[in-house]
Amino acid sequence: MTKTILHIDLDTFYVSVERLLHSELGTKPLLVGGTGDRGVVAACSYETRGFGVHSGMPMKMAKELCPEAMVIRGNAGTYSRYSDMVTDIIKEKVPLFEKSSIDEFYADLSGMDRFFGVYKYATELRQKVIDETGLPISFGLSINKVVSKVATNEAKPNNQLKIDQGFEKPFLAPLSIKKIPMVGDKTYQTLRNLGLRQVRTVQEMPIDVMQRVLGANGAVIWKRANGMDDTPVVPFCERKSISTERTFDRDTIDVHRLKGVLIAMTENLAYQLRRGEKLTACITVKIRYSDFNTYSKQIRIPYTSADHILIPKILGVFKNLYNRRLLVRLVGIRFSHLVSGNYQINLFDDTEEILNLYHAMDTIRERYGDKSVIRASGLGAKTIGRMHNPFNGLPPVVLAHRKQ
């Protein structure tokens, strides 16, 4: 049976979410990512690409190329929530799908032509995502993952494209070799040095020539250029870990600041666990020093999603890992061994006040955003000074309501 593979991609996902939430952004050039000099562009709007801006570029360089662009730090929790919305829609409509990234999906629709018109089915699925989320989305449809992915990129922005069986090579032939999945900057330059510009030229070359130039990867690229790919759609399974990290604008040895950042990151990840009804049983702390040496340490813990349990554990791991003689460039945290489940009261440690506090804080976050309420300790000692704790021994919190 001939396969039918659908590739779905949410167009400029982070940018689209920001525009959906903030209509005043309109069609202004946008950059989403780290706002400091060491920040990296996580996403950029189509308006910035004409200036040479692309994702993965240092933010400082992107701002030099496109000075009029607005820079938005972004919110991973918000993007995850919208990604989950799209995932739920696809899960409801598609029997076998793969979530390859936060904004990209594959679906195996093989055999569905017996009951539905596959292109019509994919069109209706795309429209359902648009209607229910408000996000632009594109898709490509063909006999395999590679051709479908290239078709999606050709269909963008906010469009769709079907490549009929037997037309894979003619479709790919006039395209730039850089559009073949797996051809990165280094490989592209190697092929350009050989005088190769279009996919057509690769199609006309013997496969052994590509192997001599690029080794085993040469054979894979040759097959992809010819529209050949038998990679299966891997059934979606929920992620087993969540993580975050922070690169400082300037390397620091300020222990109070480092602990404050770790507390804030732990608090945010714990909230994501509770919102997703997940518990973690393993925590990892990562430190990268100014000499770029990176170290990490992990420990197993009882399943939990509670800040007041996770924060002391994280700080304890950090204390054992940290070398006070060196400046720190980056810190990171990862929660793994995730399982489904709601936070259960610990009869020995928890009180009704703690449970009510979590419920109140999470309710505020749901309404005003992930960072609308945070522990004072997460702001850093230099920022907050000494504060009175109104919760009788509980960690103090600071409410920061966003203007509506």
Image (cartoon, grey):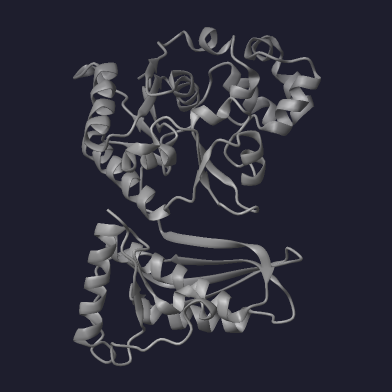
> In the shown orientation, is residue 339 left or right of residue 114?
right
Report the front residue among 369 and 196.
369
- The reply to whether residue 222 is in sight is yes
Q: Residue at x 69, y 82 (%)?
A: 324
Total numbered labels: 0
> In the shown orientation, is residue 71 left or right of residue 392?
right
> In the shown orientation, is residue 216 left or right of residue 92?
right
Q: Position of residue 294 (x, y in %)?
A: 68, 66
Q: Quadrant of residue 61?
A: top right
Q: Residue at x 24, y 78 (%)?
A: 357
Q: Above or below — where is 227 with respect to 351? A: above
Q: Position of residue 46 (x, y in %)?
A: 50, 28
Q: Position of residue 95 (x, y in %)?
A: 26, 35
Q: Quadrant of residue 161?
A: top left
Report the front residue among 1 and 394.
394
Q: Residue at x 57, y 38 (%)?
A: 55
Q: Residue at x 38, y 25 (%)?
A: 138
Report the front residue among 13 and 251.
251
